[in-house]
Amino acid sequence: MPELRKQRWKCILCHYMYDPVMGDIEHGVKARVPFHELLHHWECPKCKSRKNLFRQVIEEESASL
Ligand SMILES: [Zn+2]
């Protein structure tokens, strides 16, 4: 299973970060829901941007031992 931690998406307008580890409980999104599985009408909790205004956050992670 791919690490959810590497699948964060950021709103380009307000910099809200969608973290699948947390989900978006306040708006009915359970934890561990990947960004691509969010409902089509999901919008940024802060500025109401649509999903197409989010960009994936690429994180370089050193090998975890
Ligand atoms: Zn936003």
Image: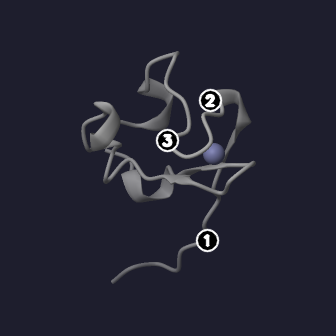
Assign a secondary structure to mark 3.
Answer: loop
Nearer to the camera, 12 or 58: 12
Kindly identify which residue carries mark 3.
45
Q: Please rate how many residues cluster around mark 2, counting C-alpha atoms within 10 Å: few if below 14, some from 14 to 19, many from 20.
A: some
Q: Is residue 62 left or right of residue 39?
A: right
Q: Which numbered dot is residue 60?
A: 1
Q: Is residue 46 left or right of residue 21?
A: right
- Closer to the observer: label 2 or label 3? 3
Dot placed on the residue nearer the N-terminal end, 1 or 3: 3
Kindly identify which residue carries mark 2.
51
Q: Which numbered dot is residue 28?
A: none
Dot placed on the residue nearer the N-terminal end, 2 or 1: 2
Give the residue type at disc 2.
Lys
Q: Please rate how many residues cluster around mark 1, counting C-alpha atoms within 10 Å: few if below 14, some from 14 to 19, many from 20.
A: few
Residue at position x 41%, y 59% from top? 5
Tell me where residue 27 appears, x and y as whole percent: 34, 34
Tell me where residue 40 appears, x and y as whole percent: 52, 16
Residue at position x 30%, y 41% from top? 26
Assign a secondary structure to mark 2.
Answer: helix
Residue at position x 68%, y 53% from top? 14
Give the residue type at disc 1.
Glu
- Closer to the observer: label 2 or label 1? 2
Is the CB of the residue bearing disc 3 within 8 angstroms of ligand 1? yes
Task: Looking at this view, name the residue that lies furthest to the top.
Answer: 40
Is residue 3 visible in this depiction of the protein?
Answer: no
Q: Please rate how many residues cluster around mark 3, counting C-alpha atoms within 10 Å: few if below 14, some from 14 to 19, many from 20.
A: some
Quadrant of the image for the C terminus?
A: bottom left
